[in-house]
Image (cartoon, helix red, strand yellow):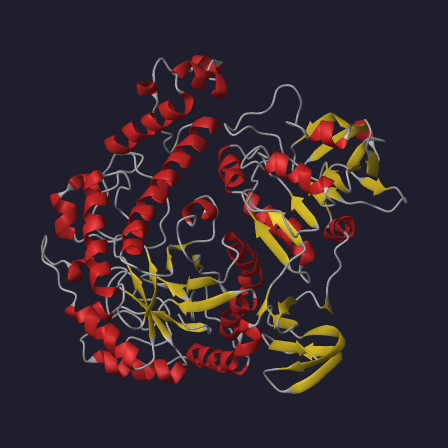
Amino acid sequence: MEKKIYLGAAYYPEMWEESEVDADIARCRETGVNTLRVGEFAWGKMEPKEGEFDFGWLERTVDKLHAAGISVVMCTPTCTPPRWMMNKYEEMRRVDSTGIRTEVSSRCHPCKTSPKMREKNAVIVTEMAKRFAHRPGIIGWQIDNEIFPYGGGCYCPLCMNAFRAYLKDKYKTAEALNKKWGMQRWSLEYQSFDDVQPPRDGQWRHPSLRVEWERFQCAQIVSYVNEQADILHEYGCENVGTDMMGTNELSYYDLNAKLDVVQFNHYNPAADLPRTAFSYDFLRCVKDKPFWVTETQAGWNGSEFAEFGYRPVGNCYANTWLPVAKGAEMNLYWLFRTHPNGHELAHGALFSTAGRAYRVSQEVARAAEDFEKCGDFLLKSKVRSKLAIHYSSSAVKTFEAAPLIKNFNYRETVMDKFYEAFRHCNVDVIDTAHALDGYEVVVSPFLATVDENGLKERIVEWVKAGGTWIVGPMSDIMTEYASKYTAAPYSFLEELVGVYTKYQIPVSNDVFCAKDKSGKDFPVSMCYDAYELRGARSLADYTEGEFGGLCAAAERKVGKGKVILLGSVPSREALRALSGIAPFAEASANVLVIERTGEENGLIAVETENAEGWIFLDGSYVDLLTDKTQEGRVSLSPYQVMVLKKY
């Protein structure tokens, strides 16, 4: 795979006459598109009858694209088995929580446990690998499409029996499960694993049951994907991945462990452009290598009607640039050309059904020209971070099942209250399995379970070696079974930091105030833990009521480093001060600044909010997009991008 920036879209040649391919190649050249993603929903055309395969149309398409210099990401079509197959083998269709088997009317409806589904997947993936593994022009593979436990997963008899087997393997006896989950409450004890029913909509569902059901469904998906990956790798296919949406409920680390490249789909509307940066800083870390954006909307989203609004002038250009600035090597739009019929008639694209370009198409073409101008800088520099923020798949599941704070959203809170404090710094967003080497500061907010993936032991050793760990609030408060600890509010943080937790109040209204040791206001919000000191020193104290004089944020030196325990959510300004991490450039809040270092060094600045912005440069830089020298305070127009190479 050639080292360059890959830009393009999803393309569905099965929807068109083959004569259209040449015209679409011309449209690719018009917009700077150098990559198309094909095959993901075309199983019915690949296997029109059981055991009879037709790949000629797809081979001709790939060959034409390759001859035109357009790379291909080949997709396995297992998201959409053909109707004849789903009707013949009913067990392949997912059952929803009400017990109704899914109709063959859309996509993403296969059961991930069904042996027949797995068997048929292996057949079609093997046939594809035989024909396309080494075909010129194919640079990578996508398995399935936006795989996820939709609707809470599959509730068919096969899945329920597999779930019970999963529980038996983990807990060994029903008595052990009852004890871990506290099932004696309300006399809910299971007599055997056969008594266990999965959680269903409309019921007051036990948090431990919900978390384990979610883990089981995710484990089935990981196995489902890995079976396909094994086949593709056996035949020599390279750059194998699976396109995923933004949530970390299905662990990115688990699902990508045996894959080669992290792939990501998002449909954030124009106003959410700054927030997509959080996902990019997470994706880059999963395998510590460049990631692929495999889907994002060009003009607008839609199904039978359009929604999310039309991107304002310049937004598509900035949306094309931002993932690349953050470390992506591919950005693909959904889709290349709007379908002439079907479920998504109203979805935006680079080209209309009639093949006519939009203004956003011109913005993609402009970005393509930019990538050519500064390709060396992008390929010879990387995003490196001294600061990491934990974003845990385990915490996603735990707080979904037991949020504790009413209307609490874990992802949004980590993003808005913690990640946004470091907008002008490079930040790695990591899960708990990620290595800690190289970081100076790690922030772990709302990390419900610390005792997983060896993190508890690893992070203590990392602190002793000189790291600063800012942990809390509401971290280390739950077991892996979504149960609270009984000997203390935390599994080990009181002892590590040297505090006694006198109060814990998980209320979201702002009812308490605090001041730091200099007497300056130390704003706190969302939840409130109050500490008595047992060897720690206080960084901020509560000021009134029963909390008056108790510690709101404590610090203790551990070896060469230190641990800062937060009893509440501090302001962004206070969090930055506690971290000791300084921005590498002053800039207005609407400008994202990314530092790139390596063989070449510099900054990339992206205006993200359709407003005038600025950045202050402490030296001389050349803007590779304009060839102009820039220094001091520099203005950015709405959605402007500057690629600033340091002299």
Q: Is residue 449 above or below residue 190?
A: below
Q: Where's residue 259, x and y in %?
A: 39, 53
Outermost residue on the right side: it is 518
User: Horizontal placement of 553 versus 188: left or right?
Assistant: right
Identified at 71% across, 68% down, the residue is 588
Q: Is residue 513 above or below residue 412?
A: above
Outermost residue on the bottom side: it is 627
Identified at 74% across, 42% down, the residue is 524
Any part of residue 189 in sight: no
Q: Is residue 591 above or below residue 129?
A: below
* Of the pair 541 and 535, the residue shown nearer to us: 535
Count of marks, rendered view: 0
* Of the pair 281 and 19, the residue shown nearer to us: 281
Quadrant placement of the N terminus: bottom left
* Of the pair 327 and 349, the residue shown nearer to us: 327
Q: Is residue 396 above or below residue 284?
A: above
User: Horizontal placement of 314 versus 213: left or right?
Assistant: right
Q: Where's residue 185, x and y in %?
A: 49, 15
Quadrant placement of the C terminus: bottom right
User: Horizontal placement of 136 versus 208: left or right?
Assistant: left
Residue 34 position by quadrant: bottom left
Q: Where's residue 97, x and y in %?
A: 31, 35
Any part of residue 14 in sight: yes
Residue 474 position by quadrant: top right
Q: Where's residue 350, x and y in %?
A: 38, 75
Identified at 53% across, 37% down, the residue is 453
